[in-house]
Image (tube, coloured by chain):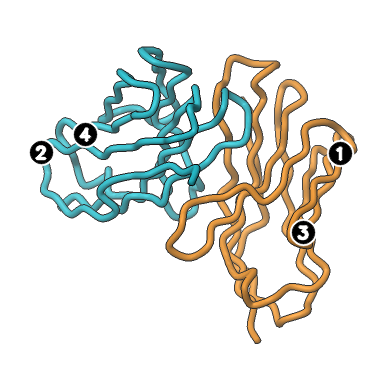
Amino acid sequence: GDSVTQMEGPVTLSEEAFLTINCTYTATGYPSLFWYVQYPGEGLQLLLKATKADDKGSNKGFEATYRKETTSFHLEKGSVQVSDSAVYFCALSDLFHSNDYKLSFGAGTTVTVRA
Amino acid sequence: EAQVTQNPRYLITVTGKKLTVTCSQNMNHEYMSWYRQDPGLGLRQIYYSMNVEVTDKGDVPEGYKVSRKEKRNFPLILESPSPNQTSLYFCASSYTAGHEQFFGPGTRLTVL
């Protein structure tokens, strides 16, 4: 079945450092890929998404490119801020190539940014 | 304001005492889903609903029930809660399956 593997955390960075969170996936078809962010005490919210190969999703300074050849969707940000401290989840949805009507999530990566 | 609401936000209960966690969305979404979040496991889907009166099992449905009598509401029912159902629960909705999901704030459940 479909699955998502994320790099394990926790990740601790200083402000203005470069952030990368690796995400790879396994899917039978051509899934849509998502990054969700969960700030402390809140629900998940969509950070960015990509629906086909070579698409780049971007939002709030974060970027991720859908790489079909490496089945990856790594999240990057060039200069993190304390307010980026959160848990980040990679997820996929393969609705149109399977009967699996769900988002499959990675385990989540906790990121802490120090001032 | 477009939102998904859950109640209660926090609940401590005892084994075997039936409980219901409510979920409501005001976006006229067709698709709704329940997830549980456990450390190191990410989010796992419990049940989902494609539309009114259409529900199906997710990855971890054992011990849970749902109903979808109205489009906006999707309650999660634990008929006889057990300690292994202690978790953080999220309700989510989307325009239709496969699209961006909007999440509620979560319900932290402890079963003693």
Q: Are marks 3 and 4 on the same chain?
A: no
Numbered tag placed on residue A79 in the rendering: none
Would you name the residue on which mark 4 appears?
Answer: B78
Would you name the residue on which mark 3 appears?
Answer: A62
Q: Secondary structure at mark 1?
A: loop
Q: Are marks 3 and 2 on the same chain?
A: no
Q: Nearer the viewer, residue A79 or A25?
A: A79
Q: Nearer the viewer, mark 1 or mark 2?
A: 1
Q: Amino acid at mark 4?
A: Leu
Q: Which chain is cyan?
A: B
Which of the chains bears the disc numbered 2? B
Q: Amino acid at mark 3?
A: Phe
Q: Which residue is most to the front?
A: B1
Q: Secondary structure at mark 4?
A: strand
Marks 1 and 2, how far apart at CA: 49 Å
Would you name the residue on which mark 2 appears?
Answer: B16
Numbered tag placed on residue A55 in the rendering: 1
On screen, residue A61 above or below B37: below
Marks 1 and 3, how far apart at CA: 14 Å
Residue A23 point in image, percent of width and height: 72, 48
Q: Are marks 4 and 2 on the same chain?
A: yes
Q: Which chain is orange?
A: A
Q: Secondary structure at mark 2?
A: loop
Q: Nearer the viewer, residue B12 or B28?
A: B28
On screen, residue A115 above or below B6: below
Q: Amino acid at mark 2?
A: Gly
Residue B20 point in image, percent of width and height: 21, 36
Which of the chains bears the disc numbered 4? B
